[in-house]
Image: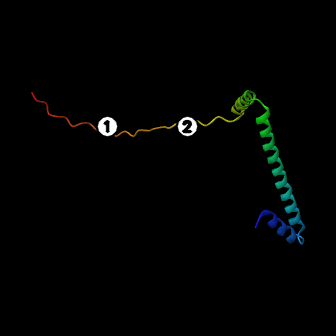
Amino acid sequence: MDLSSSLAAAASASAASPSLAKAVDTYRKAVGTAATLTAYTVLARGMARELVPHDLRAAVAWAASLVRARFEPRPAERRTVIIRRRRPVRPRPREPRLR
């Protein structure tokens, strides 16, 4: 069962429920808008790759990375604290002195 047949089934079942029909219509519009935006993005990237010189694209990418680095939060520093547990110091037994 593909998307169009499931949407058609939902639309026919929604004849009794106008809110379901409205939800299906809104969903169709959202999916159509997302597909259109994706197609335009792919088309624009392809045209930019063919028409804009490589050096200019590299400069724009470098500038964009600087802007991203400026506005993104810094990565958290990771520090490890090592606590060594020391054994209590016990007095050594004294050895007898030889004279």
Camera-nearest label, 1 or 2: 2
Relative to 4, is 51 above or below?
Answer: above
Quadrant position of residue 52? top right
Please state which amino acid type lies under the numbered disc 2: Arg
Residue on which disc 1 sits? 89
Viewed as shown, does residue 82 lie left or right of 98?
A: right
Could you tell me which residue is drawn at 86 percent across and 58 percent down?
26
Give the spatial CA distance, label 1 vs label 2.
33 Å
Viewed as shown, does residue 16 lie left or right of 52?
A: right
Is the residue marked by circle 2 packed among few (<14), some (14-19), or many (20+) residues within 10 Å? few
Relative to 65, is 39 above or below?
Answer: below
- Say whether disc 1 or disc 2 marks the residue closer to the N-terminus: 2
Residue on which disc 2 sits? 78
Q: Quadrant of the N terminus?
A: bottom right
Viewed as shown, does residue 78 lie left or right of 38?
A: left
Could you tell me which residue is drawn at 76 percent across and 36 percent down?
49
